[in-house]
Amino acid sequence: MEETHSLDERPQSFFKMIAGSDSSENILSRFFCACFSNSPAFAQVALTTIWQGAGLSGSAPKPDGWACHYQCATPEHGGGRPDLCLIPPSKVTPGLTASHKPIFIESKVQSVLGEKQLKRYKEYGTEVLVAITKNWPEVSQQKLDSIGVKSLRWQDMCRALRQIKIRGPKNQFLCEKFATYLEESRMAYREDITPKELEKVRSLLVKVASQKNEGHNVPRAAFQTANDLMEFFQDARRLVQERLPTFAWAKWGPAYHHEFDDNDDEIAEHALGFGFWKGKRALNCYIYFPVEKSELIHFWLWLTRQNKEPLEKLLPVKNVLSKRKLDADKLADAVVKAARAWHVV
């Protein structure tokens, strides 16, 4: 097989071009601060997402009068400098009645979310402290709750920016470019994976695995969608674990798998998915991509057991879609339903 090539070497987006290869917390925080300060629409999305994602009391406020400062010191001297601080109008304009408290934000991209650092911020007067992370927090939610820290992910911010209708060219530009920067820097993944996008992944897998002596051109977008799909599986798997807290099996994946035809000559199906295992049992959760385009892409669950026939459940991929896009909640629900029906929990 000849080397595959990309056909769409597109230029980098606005913020990515400025950041270059630097994907540090500092760069992200500066971009966030600039967008918050220059786009009321971005500020509203940010406040609403933080309010809802972090479970702050009451309704999210309007952004009028709010300010975003980069690396403000903790209220009490010596506690350090969280990455961002959202300051309510009462703190910006003297004389206004205080209705909200400053929101200190600790952003994590590559480094680990540290319990000691968060505790220090709290001890030095940050009453409202929110951690926004690239990955799921290394500190357990129970521990975060015990020290009074709220948490969400940059994925939540990206999703909100992609879903809301933005008016005005400047607002549209900053909101869209910030979301794109999160995706290009792998701090968030695209969630709008449609059946059409899945067909592109099928074509990618078939071409990459082909043993025919001919060149294959595979657009870069197909590789990106496949990677987004793997990120999607990580979230779906975590949702399964949250809904089945007593399901203590070890997890594996996301991973690639394939199956041969009856003659074991050629690959008949490619698959991407995740699963759980305990001893000789494994619960496998895959989206299957048959090589033949006439065959439908499907979501396949099966339970393997020692000395017993496997249990299987085959679902059309449309069963795990919402508004024609893959839905992590629906996919997790299907896994949970099968796990309960097969008495693995």
Image (tube, rainbow, N blue to C red):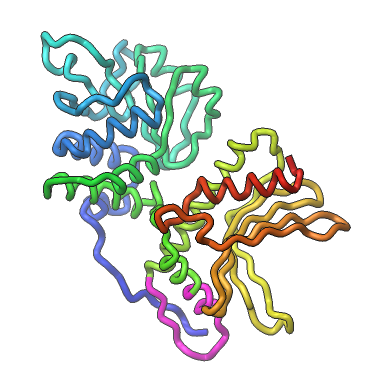
In front: 163, or 121? 163
Front-most of residues 196 and 215: 196
Q: Residue at x 53, y 52 (%)?
A: 233
x then y, percent, for residue 49: 33, 34
Magenta residues, as a range?
A: 203-219
**Residue 14 percent across, percent down from the top left:** 21, 54
The picture quadrant where one finds residue 96 is top left
- Identify the residue shown where x is 11% and y is 16%: 93
Is residue 217 found inside the magenta-colored segment of the image?
A: yes
Q: Residue at x 39, y 48 (%)?
A: 188
Check the picture and name the quadrant holding the C terminus. Answer: top right
Q: Is residue 133 above or below residue 333?
A: above
Spot occupied by residue 248 in the image (x, y as percentages of width and height): 70, 38
Query: Which of the 4 quarters of the picture holds residue 122?
Result: top left
339 left or right, relative to 143: right
Relative side of 128 to 260, left or right: left
Tell me how many marks there are: 0
> Taking 179 as reference, is 141 above or below it?
above
Q: Quadrant of residue 39?
A: top left
* Residue 32 highlighted magenta (yes or no): no
Q: Left or right: 137 with respect to 123?
A: right
Q: Residue furthest bottom?
A: 213
Residue 195 horizontal/vertical position (percent)? 44, 65
Q: Residue at x 33, y 76 (%)?
A: 7
* Picture layout, residue 161 above or below residue 113: below
Residue 170 vs 13, above or below: the answer is above
